Image (cartoon, grey):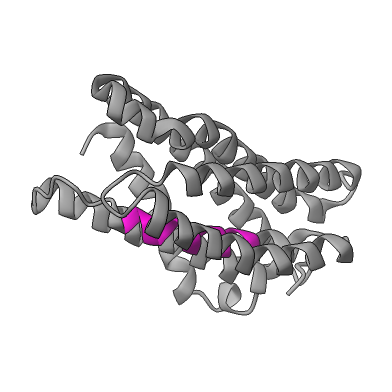
Amino acid sequence: MNFIETIYFILLSFFLFGFFNKIVTQSKKLLALSFLESTVFFFNLLGAFTYYILKLKNNLIIFHVLAPLQYFLTIRVMRLYFNQKSIKMVLNFLVPFIITLNIVFSIFFQKITEYNSFALLLNNTIIGFLSIILLWEALNEFDSEQVFAKYWIAFGLFINSFFAFFIQGFMNFFIVKRMDFAFNMYKVEMLTYTLSTFLLLKAFYSEYKLTKLGNGNK
């Protein structure tokens, strides 16, 4: 495990402590964010364990399972921050539809032994688009102290989805054509993961302060 991967796992691990904090467990937003990042932590830890310790050459099934689960939990977090009821209704429709497509992609197109670029391309496109809308909402509410967590959520998810679109979305192509280039893209991917996780951690801290003061939206 390299330096960036270590930092990434350390940042993710902070979200685990949320489940042992009374203030966090009283807030839907903090809990949703904790579930999202803790899930990402456990699946990536499992991926690292199977690759570095068990020496499995192909552990991609782990990330086929993670993709729809991470999408569901990300949408759950975003839904808590959106103000517009129309967007929330659209999200309710999108969740089962996109998860079904993720499963279809894994069964019929890019199977569990292949990198699931199709599913990740779809997921990151939707999350990226939604994060822009959420970011716009946050900027329009920037005179309120309660907006900072919303801003960091939107910014963090946008950074993650934007770079993931170009890296994860074409990773299967890179693997097939140029494995050395795929490894370089993986390093860039880990950098963007680390940055976006740091931003989500800032969102978590901002929401935690609001909730502790009694100003958070539970």
Q: Is residue 33 above or below residue 154?
A: below
Q: Tell me the quarter of the picture where residue 161 sits.
A: top right
Q: Along the horizontal axis of the image, is 47 left or right of 104? A: left
Say how many tags the image has: 0
State left or right for residue 148 relative to residue 22.
right
**Residue at the spot 35% in from the left edge and 49% down from the top edge:** 10
Residue 88 appears left or right of 177: right
Whether 166 is drawn above or below 64: the answer is above
Q: Which quadrant holds residue 142?
A: top right
State the extent of the magenta-drawn residues as a range. 62-76
Locate the N terminus by quadrant: top left
Q: Residue furthest left?
A: 54
Give coordinates of residue 166: x percent, y percent: 51, 29
- Relative to 185, say whether 215 is above or below: below
Q: Is residue 172 magenta?
A: no
Residue pictured at 80% horizontal, 59% vertical: 82
Q: Nearer the viewer, residue 39 or 30?
A: 39
Q: Is residue 191 visible?
A: no
| Position of the C terminus by quadrant | bottom right
